[in-house]
Image (cartoon, helix red, strand yellow):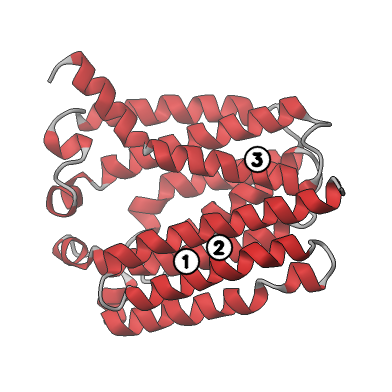
Amino acid sequence: MTAGETVRGLLELTRPVNVVAASVLTFIGAFVAGSVSEYPFAVAAAVAATGLAVGAGNAINDYFDREIDRINQPGRAIPRGAVSPRGALVFSLVLFGAAVALALVLPRLAIAIAAINLAALVAYTEVFKGLPGVGNALVAYLVGSTFLFGAAAVGELGPAVVLFLLAAIATLTREIIKDVEDIEGDREEGLNTLPIAIGERRALLVATGLLLVGVAASPFPYFLGEFGAAYLALVVPAVAIMCYATYESFDDPTAGQEHLKYGTFLAAVAFIVGRGVIVFPA
């Protein structure tokens, strides 16, 4: 492998799209808290720390999952030889170190969230991933907590708590569907994921039930007066996309989990617009 291919492989390990997405969610958490302009340095540090931590978590996940990926994802950086397992491990530790350095300049609540998340990222693959539903729930917490981290960076959780709960539910639904998609490789490696433990259809029914709970809770910020009609106008199509994606997953888990992600991001946009209308009234 050339140096260029190795650099490309290292970048792939971080999952750049996921890094950007998580960083944006942290910014949204700070924005929903209503204090971005007052604490620009803290927001920037939180956003950067999130991106680095997510990149590190993805890299170390690929390090531990390298044998499974030879079956499920043979084109990934480690299985195809672009990055050695040791190189991926060292790279992840460097990113983790940078994330910790940035997190330490933030308020104590944000540091506490960062410490919990970093420990969870490291332990996920080796400790929790193979436990039916537990690994899924941990990933759901980690995604939702990016909103809490952004809000904590500016010292005010506020409406970000609701956003955390809704994002966690949507992510948990998607993670279960992804396990259905990856069932062949997971079974080969002896993992006991939820679809393996209770069956694919039952796992998808659990995912559907979880999503319906999130759908039922999604109008609450509007009814509580935290967000205006603009929020409602965007969150309705967002939950419609997520409901369709979950239905679609019974026939095509790959397409279903991908489309569910689109609905989740549209819901995040709904929070931005809804908060913006209140903070910056016309």
Residue that badge 1 annotates: 172
- In the image, residue 281 above or below residue 91: below
Image position, residue 163 (x, y; %): 66, 59
For marks 3 and 1, the one nearer the N-term is 3
Q: Secondary structure at mark 3?
A: helix
- Residue 112 in sight in this render: no
Q: Indicate the amino acid at tag 2.
A: Ala
> In the figure, is residue 10 to the left or right of 169?
left
Q: Secondary structure at mark 2?
A: helix
For the residues bearing labels 2 and 3, Cβ distance under 8 angstroms? no
Q: CA distance from mark 3 to mark 1?
A: 21 Å
**Residue depicted at x 27% and y 45%:** 64
Q: Indicate the amino acid at tag 3.
A: Phe
Q: CA distance from mark 1 to mark 2?
A: 6 Å
- Residue 239 in sight in this render: yes
Q: Secondary structure at mark 1?
A: helix
For marks 2 and 3, the one nearer the N-term is 3
Residue that badge 2 annotates: 168
The image quarter containing residue 205 is bottom left
Decide which of 260, 14 is in the foreground and name it. Answer: 260
For the residues bearing labels 3 and 1, Cβ distance under 8 angstroms? no
**Residue depicted at x 85% and y 47%:** 279
For the residues bearing labels 1 and 2, Cβ distance under 8 angstroms? yes
Mark 3 or mark 1, which is nearer to you? 3
Q: Indicate the amino acid at tag 1.
A: Leu
**Residue depicted at x 64% and y 34%:** 46
User: If the image is split into quadrants, where does the N terminus sit?
Assistant: top left
Image position, residue 70 (x, y; %): 13, 48
Image position, residue 4 (x, y; %): 22, 17
Residue that badge 3 annotates: 27
- What is the crowding at mark 3: few (fewer than 14 residues within 10 Å), some, or many (at least 20)? many
